[in-house]
């Protein structure tokens, strides 16, 4: 894991892109921007580019072990969520420079990433 900070804020923020880059251990510029309107498709494409595949893990089936992405209610934007990196159910990285999500409860669910074998072409 690499601690990558988001560079865009508000409704056009890039916390998901920064959290994914952190989880993959790459620079922010190495992950394609993930827009809000097609976030799952773009996140999947970005993860595949780094040989990982995202899987949705609902909260009601328990907390996943290992690294994953999670979300909290945004401390800055009412009704919005904020992406964080989670390890064994604990927030270990908040990509926002304020670093104020560590004590907030996780909401919605988790995104677990499984490694893919690179093509042997």
Image (tube, grey):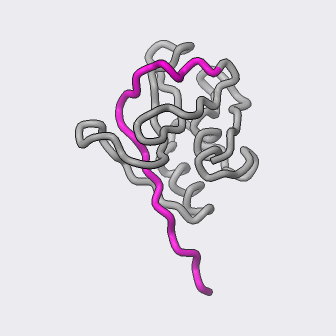
Q: Position of residue 89 (x, y in %)?
A: 40, 36
As drawn, the residue found furthest toward the left would be: 60
**Residue 75, relative to residue 2: is it above or below?**
above
Q: Residue at x 61, y 52 (%)?
A: 24
Q: Is residue 103 magenta?
A: yes
- Residue closer to the observer: 78 or 94: 94
| Up-down relation of residue 41 to residue 14 (above or below) | below
Give 1 or 81, whichever is nearer the viewer.
1
Name above or below for residue 37 compared with residue 82: below
Q: Nearer the viewer, residue 62 or 79?
A: 62
Q: In terms of image quadrants, where is residue 90? A: top left
Residue 22: image location, x then y, percent: 64, 44
The residue under the point 49% across, 51% down is 41
The residue at the point 62 percent across, 86 percent down is: 121
Membership of 81 in magenta stretch: no
**Residue interval drawn in magenta:** 99-121
Hey, which quadrant is residue 8 in on the image?
top right
How many numbered marks does the figure carry?
0
Furthest toward the bottom, the residue is: 121
Q: Residue at (50%, 69%) from the top-left corner?
A: 116
Image position, residue 18 (x, y; %): 64, 39
Give how far across and how far down residue 95 sits, in percent: 64, 31
């Amino acid at each position: 894991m690499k601690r990558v900070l988001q560079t865009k804020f508000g409704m056009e923020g890039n916390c998901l892109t920064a959290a994914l880059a952190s989880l993959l251990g790459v620079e922010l510029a190495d992950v394609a921007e993930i827009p809000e309107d097609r976030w799952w498709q773009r996140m999947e494409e970005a993860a595949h580019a780094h040989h990982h595949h995202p899987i949705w893990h609902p909260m009601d089936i328990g907390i996943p072990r290992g690294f994953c992405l999670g979300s909290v209610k945004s401390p800055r934007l009412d009704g919005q969520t904020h992406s964080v990196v989670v390890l064994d159910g604990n927030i270990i990285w908040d990509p926002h420079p304020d670093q104020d999500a560590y004590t907030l409860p996780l909401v919605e669910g988790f995104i677990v990433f499984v490694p893919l074998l690179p093509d042997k072409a």
